[in-house]
Amino acid sequence: MAMARASSGLQYPERFYAAASYVGFDGSTSPTKTLTSKFANSTSLLLYSLYQQASVGPCNVPEPSTWKLVEHSKWASWNQLGTMSSTEAMRLFVKILEEEDPGWYSRASNSVSEPVIDVQMNHNSNVEPVIENGNSYPETKTISTQNGSEVGTEDKDIVLEGFSSVGVYDQWIAPPVSGQSPKARYEHGAAVVQDKLYIYGGNHNGRYLNDLHVLDLRRWTWSKIETKAGDESPTTSIPCAGHSLIPWGNKLLSVAGHSKDPSESIQVKVLDLQTATWSTLKTFGKAPVSRGGQSVTLVGGTLVIFGGQDPKRTLLNDLHILDLETMTWDEIDAVGVPPSPRSDHTAAVHVERYLLIFGGGSHATCYNDLHVLDLQTMEWSHPTQLGEIPTPRAGHAGVTVGENWFIVGGGDNKSGVSETAVLNMSTLAWSVVTSVQGRVPVASEGLSLVVGSYNGEDVLISFGGYNGRYNNEVYVLKPSHKSTLQSKVIESSVPDSVSAVPNATNATRDVESEFEAGHEGKNWEVVLDNADPAKSKGDIISALKAEKEELESSLSKEKQHALQLKQELAESESRNTDLYKELQSIRGQLASEQSRCFKLEVEVAELGQKLQTIGTLQKELELLRRQKAASEQAALNAKQRQNSGGGVWGWLAGAPPDQNADDA
């Protein structure tokens, strides 16, 4: 029978204390030795700063001298955490430890007083209902993972926890919801406005839907909204699928989408949430051709539309922007190589400048390529992806939390994708958040994914999808990936993979506490021996002096070892700094070379045109020369004829004979 550890044993803060003890922050071992032997230097630095934040609080110590690289690196790392709460620091400390040393808990459990509780899994469990607000709901379902890999049997696992299990990180939870759930569907629109999740339209058994439902994310209760036509540019909700639902103030924009009777160009519908009325957005300029499966991204006050599939099933890769201030369409002819024509891809914006396009599919192929559009220069690029690159997929969903872009679901024409992946848009490195088992809704195509809030923290909320059957379940995941810590570390004065371990003073303090513990035990032995009346007071003092000398010798060795580590750290940081500067220099040179090459190409094109012009002028000049020569020859001939014909009259007139005539 499958077994799983309920919530992985201890809860906070006891779990943090167990983790801190495991890495040596309780004085039982030297944290300096433990950290450097088990973890990379950058991880050691993060663990140190998080431990200080959790146990001491925000950094209030004076900034050390910058030439003291180790002390300054540690101070900067701690200081960058700002006013992070002790609870959050504890959670991140344990999270980093679990990522770096997945089996730490089982190895440390022999020193933890609380026993590990095993919970029976799957269908042999007796599921008790949860009573909430007077209503009875089935117990929460969860798709369990442990360190990124599945545990349990071939079917989805069920952990006996209530809705409080949303407190568990990086696990998909099916929370108990009340009210009438929407009809199962996929390729619908989803958006969150003021703690309410709106679901509009979609596809069910080949039928387009136009109903509107809302899930109150505070009460987790479904309700249906009856809409009507508005007063200005009135319209009714048209059944559609493959559209995009975008929050815009206290309104929702429904952009494009497949419908039974498609229009020639993209229509933008506006839903006023206060009056529950639909209207058509009046736009200017040439609107893009009608389509579905496109991506629509809100960037500042503009909508960026890319790709999709038109009503004739032609795949598209055109790029359009709708300015929501002037309501004007603009087709963008960006430079560089755009993504190939596709639909059912995902798009995200990073730092309000870079548009990222991932995956999607054509009629026969799914993609896992990543393309980036610089919205300032309007230039496409195809950067190299790092880490655990997701497999090809289409019909997936994505949302951003800070610089983290979460990708859920999708399929490859064979099966649904079980992994939930995350891309750090600053480093373009992928990692797997969790993986589900069985045919569950989060491994579906055409599902929706939004970001909501639960107990003050961001949570991912998925709804619907198709994986052999149409779904209408809600799943929630609380990600452990936080933007604040990572961005602050990146912004630190020490570049990239800064490496440090607790400084020499802390190392000394830890060693001293370690020896104090040993000294206390040996004093106990002396007291026991002192029960023998034969032992003199002088013998005890001599024994204590010898013990003191031994401890001082050991302490000196530890200090020397700490100094050696400090020197090695300074050297590695210096190398890191040099490499980072060199990388930045090369990047700058590459950018300037690319710019220079582009200018040279323009100049070459201009010179080519000039050469063609010069060739044409040369031909014209040669023609003029020939015409001139012919004209001169004709004039000469005419003159000669004139001279020869008037010889007699010239003689009569007394003019001297022409030389040519004499010669003749």
Image (cartoon, rainbow, N blue to C red):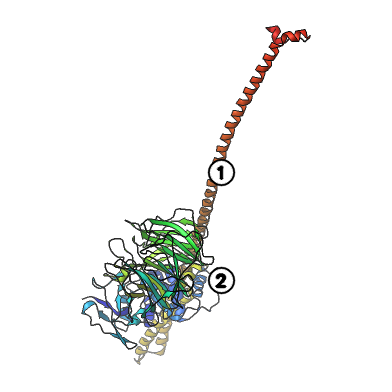
The image shows residue 263, relative to residue 647, as above or below, that is below
Q: Return the residue nearer the eye: 39 or 553.
A: 39
Give the image location of residue 440, x and y in percent.
29, 71
Give the image location of residue 511, x and y in percent.
43, 77
Residue at 64 percent of width and 20 percent of height: 634
Q: Which is more N-terminal, label 2 or label 1?
A: 2
Q: Secondary structure at mark 2?
A: loop
Q: Secondary structure at mark 1?
A: helix
Q: Answer whether residue 267 is visible to the viewer in this image.
A: yes
Give the image location of residue 137, x and y in percent.
30, 83
Residue under pointer 2? 65
Q: Return the residue nearer the eye: 262 or 130.
A: 262
Q: For residue 293, which quarter of the picture?
A: bottom left
Q: Quadrant of the N terminus?
A: bottom left
What mark, if any, has residue 96 been given in the picture?
none
Q: For residue 258, which quarter of the picture?
A: bottom left
Q: Return the residue nearer the eye: 2 or 23.
A: 2
Instruction: Name the amino acid type tagged 1.
Output: Glu
Q: Quadrant of the C terminus?
A: top right
Q: Answer whether residue 511 is visible to the viewer in this image.
A: no
Counting the numbered discs, the total is: 2
Work out how far the residue at label 1 is from the one at label 2, CA to CA, in angstroms: 57 Å
Crowd band around label 1 with a 10 angstrom C-alpha radius: few (<14), some (14–19), many (20+): few
Q: For residue 142, which quarter of the picture?
A: bottom left
The image shows residue 578, relative to residue 36, as above or below, that is above
Residue under pointer 1? 606
Give the image location of residue 286, x and y in percent.
49, 58
Disc 1 versus disc 2: nearer the observer:
1
Q: Return the residue nearer the eye: 311 or 114.
A: 311
Instruction: Name the amino acid type tagged 2.
Output: Ser
